[in-house]
């Protein structure tokens, strides 16, 4: 064997997923296809972080952990060492991973290594307090391009403890300054806006305190050295799998160290552990990309599709959906919905969803939530009249629900006012005229499961759109001892997950969409139980380009529900129907327009667009995304999707407003095989000639985009 082949083989082995342990020097090396991560034991048995970056093939390269020297009485060695999971104890004042109070008042916690176990791609390291039997199991799972970390805190001591901060993991970047943070912020109808800003000394907090994942900040981060772009530069990134109060703190210490700590939000947090009890944190996934933000996003998309989503790689492409919410609001009835269903079926729609307004006295948002029985005035034949027609038109049926909510004007609230989260005697704040059931209570959880199970058992329902239209307030749980009342924040989310898990088990084939007044419940935690998420209540196509750009940083197109709706829309903006379709076809295509008002020309265009979507959706939803031009930085937006087998690709391009008759820039493609030849096809099926991958990536594709809100798509098929 030649030396070159030997070295190549070695590199290949080294870059496969692995966990290696250098027992002599007490160093662990975890390797994904794109990164390595190392930690080790100091002479005092403290577990220290040692390395996070590109793949290493030699564990001996990583220096063993060591005890540092104090710089001064203000800068003790504990603050200079990168402890993998620091307890709050001794002179440690960086963000702790775990902070506790024992029943006897002792709050000191210093965690040292006890043991470890490795199995295939999983490693568990157990730490224990130096004094008593409070243990933490640190779990690592090595995925193909990311590592998932969580902790299990076990109280094996003889007294109760209260956890005041329980984090999933702390991540350390290579020591240095000049890093830049990217994160997603926004608000209702303006979610997932991408921000980039320099990291300075101090702490930047990304968090939700509102009980759900939140519209304001999404639990994702990326950090680069200040100069990365879509294709170049080193990027460390991560996302937290939790749909309740979460926090990611990005801290730069005075010692040139950037650390990222994430897990349950310590805000109003307290979790009581009696002797023998334990608490498991959410998983914090993270990874490292050598080739910019584009690669970082693709690694997360792969993780979601192969290791997180309920059906994994067996999941079907999302069907084309119709939902009349924007067109009819609460004004739904059997005749009206059947008329829309007939029109939707002609367009090629595959899943017909009825939104809010079908139940109880739900004529507006003042009444009905909680009374999940079909409104007999609107649906005299129950839901079966509509479902039978929808099925006979060849479509599946989906139903909107908001089961964790109640209007004070409902039979459920009149029967169970105590089921609402509350502080006794204090006001109960209504938002959208509704209160929130305390789903942390097991009786409330059983009731909610019962409602959904009954609906799914009674009717032929393929899909639930599970909505949540308000944030928490007065999160009291008076029925349990005071020490346990704040556990509501955590148990609420566990029960939410558990209901969906049980539903899916009992009704195989049932699909779920996560919605919270638009994009308020989008995270890697909920993606374990749902097939898609509602991205935003803002369906205005130009705004959507930026919302979708932010969404795509962390989440794959397959999950991104996107509707074509009527104009003028938000901002009083009108965009052409083709533009609206092409924007929405970059995710899971839906139509939310009033089809009764569409002209024949609209209907014909829509038919062609739906047919096109069906041709390209596997490439879009399961392929690799390349963001070519950003709507934040250019008047032209372009995204390219390449199928995983490299045989198909599709390019989307949008122009906001042409000025001075200037043509758009050439769109330099990515992710193609330079040596292959591709046949190019316009969105209406016209041949556009053949080009090599090399030419398409070096010289690009020239598209015509004239005037305001013009759009186009080009399909590429590998021919040689
Ligand atoms: C908020 C959702 O985001 C909308 O799509 C719609 O389902 C309404 N709620 C219904 O109340």
Image (tube, helix red, strand yellow):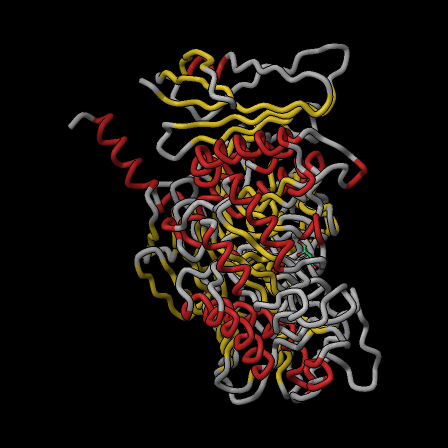
- At a point 81% along the width and 72% down the height, the residue shown is 429
- Which residue is drawn at the image coordinates 80% and 38% (left, top)? 571
The quadrant of the picture occupied by the C terminus is top left
Q: Residue furthest toward the left? A: 1
Q: Position of residue 714 (x, y in %)?
A: 51, 22
Residue 254's place in the image compared with 484, above or below, is above
Closer to us: 36 or 639: 639
Whether residue 30 is visible: no
| Quadrant occupied by the N terminus | top left
Give how far across and how far down residue 470 sits, in percent.
Answer: 73, 64
Tell me: residue 65, above or below residue 264: above
Residue 67 horizontal/vertical position (percent):
52, 57
Q: Does 383 sit left or right of 430 as displayed?
A: left
Is residue 361 shown left or right of residue 29? right
Q: Position of residue 558 (x, y in %)?
A: 50, 44
Q: Nearer the viewer, residue 507 or 86?
A: 507
Q: Quadrant of residue 496?
A: bottom right
Ligand 1 resides in the quarter of the picture at: bottom right
The image quadrant of residue 115 is bottom left
Numbered label tally: 0
The quadrant holding residue 40 is bottom left
Q: Nearer the viewer, residue 600 or 155?
A: 600
Say whether residue 206 is visible: yes
For image coordinates 48% across by 83% down, the residue present is: 156
**335 over 275 or under it: above or below:** above
């Amino acid at each position: 064997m030649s030396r070159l082949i030997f070295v190549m083989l070695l590199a290949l082995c080294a870059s496969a997923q692995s966990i290696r342990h250098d027992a002599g020097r007490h160093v662990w090396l975890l390797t994904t296809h794109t990164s390595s991560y190392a930690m080790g034991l100091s002479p005092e048995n403290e577990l220290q972080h040692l390395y996070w970056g590109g793949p290493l093939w030699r564990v001996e390269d990583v220096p063993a952990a060591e005890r540092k020297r104090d710089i001064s009485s203000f800068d003790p060695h504990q603050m200079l060492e990168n402890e993998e999971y620091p307890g709050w104890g001794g002179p440690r004042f960086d963000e702790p991973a775990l902070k506790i109070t024992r029943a006897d008042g002792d709050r000191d916690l210093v965690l040292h290594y006890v043991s470890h176990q490795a199995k295939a791609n999983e490693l568990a390291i157990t730490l224990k307090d130096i004094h008593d039997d409070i243990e933490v199991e640190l779990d690592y799972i090595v995925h193909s391009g990311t590592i998932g970390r969580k902790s299990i805190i076990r109280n094996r001591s003889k007294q109760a403890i209260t956890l005041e901060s329980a984090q999933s993991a702390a991540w350390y970047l290579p020591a240095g300054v000049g890093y830049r943070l990217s994160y997603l912020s926004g608000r209702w109808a303006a979610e997932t806006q991408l921000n980039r800003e320099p990291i300075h000394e101090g702490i930047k907090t990304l968090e939700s305190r509102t009980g759900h994942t939140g519209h304001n900040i999404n639990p994702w981060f990326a950090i680069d050295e200040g100069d990365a772009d879509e294709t170049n530069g080193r990027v460390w990134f991560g996302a937290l799998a939790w749909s309740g109060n979460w926090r990611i703190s990005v801290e730069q210490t005075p010692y040139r160290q950037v650390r990222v700590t994430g897990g349950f939000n310590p805000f109003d947090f307290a979790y009581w552990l009696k002797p023998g009890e334990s608490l498991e944190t959410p998983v914090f996934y993270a990874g490292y990309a050598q080739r910019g933000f584009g690669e970082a996003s693709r690694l997360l998309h792969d993780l979601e599709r192969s290791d997180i989503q309920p059906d994994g790689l067996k999941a079907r492409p999302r069907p084309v959906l119709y939902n009349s919410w924007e067109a009819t609001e609460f004004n739904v009835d059997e005749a009206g919905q059947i008329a829309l269903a007939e029109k939707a079926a002609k367009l090629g729609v595959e899943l017909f969803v009825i939104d809010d307004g079908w139940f109880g006295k739900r004529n507006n948002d003042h009444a009905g939530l909680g009374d999940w029985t079909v409104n007999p005035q609107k649906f005299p034949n129950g839901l079966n009249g509509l479902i039978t027609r929808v099925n006979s038109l060849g479509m599946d049926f989906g139903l909107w629900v908001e089961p964790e909510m109640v209007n004070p004007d409902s039979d459920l609230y009149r029967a169970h006012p105590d089921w609402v989260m509350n502080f006794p005697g204090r006001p109960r704040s209504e938002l959208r005229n509704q209160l929130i059931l305390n789903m942390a209570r097991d009786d409330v959880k059983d009731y909610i499961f019962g409602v959904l199970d009954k609906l799914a058992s009674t009717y032929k329902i393929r899909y639930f759109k599970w909505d949540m239209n308000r944030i928490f307030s007065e999160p009291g749980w008076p029925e349990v001892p005071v020490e346990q009342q704040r556990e509501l924040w955590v148990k609420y989310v566990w029960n939410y997950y558990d209901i969906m898990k049980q539903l899916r088990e009992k009704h195989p084939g049932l699909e779920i969409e996560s919605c919270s007044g638009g994009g308020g419940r989008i995270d890697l935690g909920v993606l374990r139980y749902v097939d898609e998420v509602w991205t935003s209540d803002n369906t205005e196509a130009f705004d959507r380009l930026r919302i979708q750009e932010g969404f795509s940083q962390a989440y794959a197109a397959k999950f991104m529900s996107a509707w074509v709706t009527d104009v003028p829309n938000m901002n009083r903006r009108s965009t052409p129907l083709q533009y609206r379709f092409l924007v929405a076809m970059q995710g899971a295509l839906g139509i939310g327009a009033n089809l009764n008002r569409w002209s024949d020309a609209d209907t014909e265009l829509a038919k062609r667009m739906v047919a096109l979507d069906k041709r390209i959706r596997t490439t879009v939803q399961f392929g690799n995304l390349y963001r070519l031009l950003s709507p934040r930085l250019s008047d032209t937006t372009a995204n390219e999707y390449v199928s995983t087998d490299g045989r198909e690709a599709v390019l989307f391009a949008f122009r906001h407003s042409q000025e001075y008759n200037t043509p758009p820039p050439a769109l330099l493609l990515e992710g193609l095989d330079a040596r292959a030849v591709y046949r190019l096809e316009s969105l209406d099926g016209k041949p556009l000639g053949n080009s090599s991958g090399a030419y398409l990536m070096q010289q690009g594709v020239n598209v015509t985009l004239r005037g305001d809100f013009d759009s186009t798509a080009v399909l590429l098929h590998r021919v040689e």
